Amino acid sequence: MSDMRIGGLATGMDIDKIVGDLMKAERIPLNKMEQEKTWLTWQRDAYRDMNKNFDELERMASDMKFSSVYNTKSTSSSMSDAVTATADPVASNGNYSIEVTQLATSAINTSSGGITKAGNEIDLNASLESQKDNFKNSASMDLANLDFTLTTFSDEGPTSKTFTITKDMSLNDVLNSVNTSDLGVRAFYDKQADKVILERTKTGNFNAGGAEIEIGGSSSFLTDVLQFSEANEKGGTDAAFTYNNALTVNSHNNSYKLNGVNFQFNDTTDGKNASIAVNNNVDHAVDKITKFVAKYNEIIESANEQVSERKNRDYKPLTDKEKEAMEEKEIELWEKQAKKGLLSNDSAIEGTLFSMRNQWYESVNTSGSFDTITDIGIKTSSNYRDGGKLLITESELRTALEDDPESVYKLFYGEGDEKGIAKKLEESLNNGMKQIEAKAGKSTSISNNFRIGKELDSIKDEMRDFEDRLNQIEDRYWSQFTAMEKAIQKMNSQSAQLMSQFG
């Protein structure tokens, strides 16, 4: 505004208030735009929250397609201190007999005696050459020009590595080079025993009739200084057990898998048989199905409430000016009413709910005992107000899972081209989410890629244009009142002059 504003000096009128009141009337269309913008923003967020719920249910439906949900096995052992087990879904139910006669052990070799002179100690981080007087058997040796070779064994055959000792290397350096090699050997020095230990990192006997850690090369450093001998090696044995009093098996590890059952050996059974029982883990399946149904009920209850909720037309979204005159609690209570009906009668949500309700009751050809969910103890609530909520009779569900878990699995997953309930629900939810996303987008969406975003952009443009128009109108009002003030001020001045002349 370029003209100076004169506010009632001549007339005594409150021009500020008059213009303000006039502008309130002029701003009414802008207030409505602001309210519409707020409403669309709330609606967009409500749609996105609904999609988050649908996405959570879709992921749970996807999880229901795995056979492990229905065919999980539980195991128990009559001698759990000696033998335990876990079972894969394919494992046959029943009892398994195991007698463990020997555990698998790691090969271990140690110095045959203390490696330091009496009263001396080794600085593990100082060079070997500087420590030679502290070793029992190294006074005449050049510890900077030695090498040694270690060989270990596996099912793939032997692995050898030669280690060269340089003049600057410490005992820790030598041991660490063994540890970081691919030999599968741990090497360390125990100060209290004054010995070096070489130990395989895996159990089992891989070199029948020989050592598991072979010493070779110019090995005087190992044999003389560190006092190693292959004859001192202990361990390196396979586990041995008898299965069902008939099959004797050796294993490099203290575990073995037979018929889908993973046996773990913790101790020998002292000539007795441990009995391992394998059964269907019905608790796990019941828990997964119950949680899925509970989440389904929770989401359809929320969705039904929102699509059936009526808009409260007595409560419009508050403008910024209106909020300035209200307490925070008043604003909160007002907006609670103003947000009612954001998703009222939405066709995408109603269509998704209708589709899901129908799919629960479509039969599935499982080639087993159960073709519908009513066969396994799941049915719809008889109370119409529940909007299609599901009820579970747990005893019936447990019986179904005990009698024919494969049929329950196929009921949810399907078989071949036959789609199960979970797959159908997943497809309905995906379709519904795509429709909602077309309306409200995602948090990462560009506004012109979804309907509400385009509407918000359009309203923002209208508001910006209208604000410019309001500024022009306000300038015009002030210009008119200022002209009036100047005219009256001029008339007052002329009147005063006339009065002075007639005075």
Image (cartoon, rainbow, N blue to C red):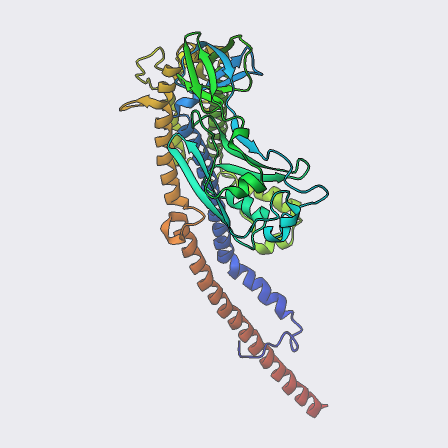
Residue drawn where x is 45% and y is 40% of the image: 182
**Residue 400 location (% of width, % of height):** 43, 11
> Which of the pair 339/95 is nearer the observer?
95
* Quarter location, residue 190: top right
Q: Quadrant of the C terminus?
A: bottom right
**Residue 172 location (% of width, % of height):** 59, 46
Total numbered circles: 0
* Quarter location, residue 47: top left
> Which of the pair 90/268 is nearer the observer?
268
> Which of the pair 404/281 is nearer the observer?
281
Tell me: residue 213, above or below residue 325. Answer: above
Residue positioned most to the bottom: 501
Tell me: residue 261, above or below residue 159. Answer: above
Residue drawn where x is 50% and y is 14% of the image: 100
Residue 386 visible from this viewpoint: no
**Residue 27 location (% of width, % of height):** 52, 60
Residue positioned most to the left: 417
Residue 341 visible from this viewpoint: yes
> Which of the pair 213/218 is nearer the observer?
218
**Residue 233 location (% of width, % of height):** 53, 29
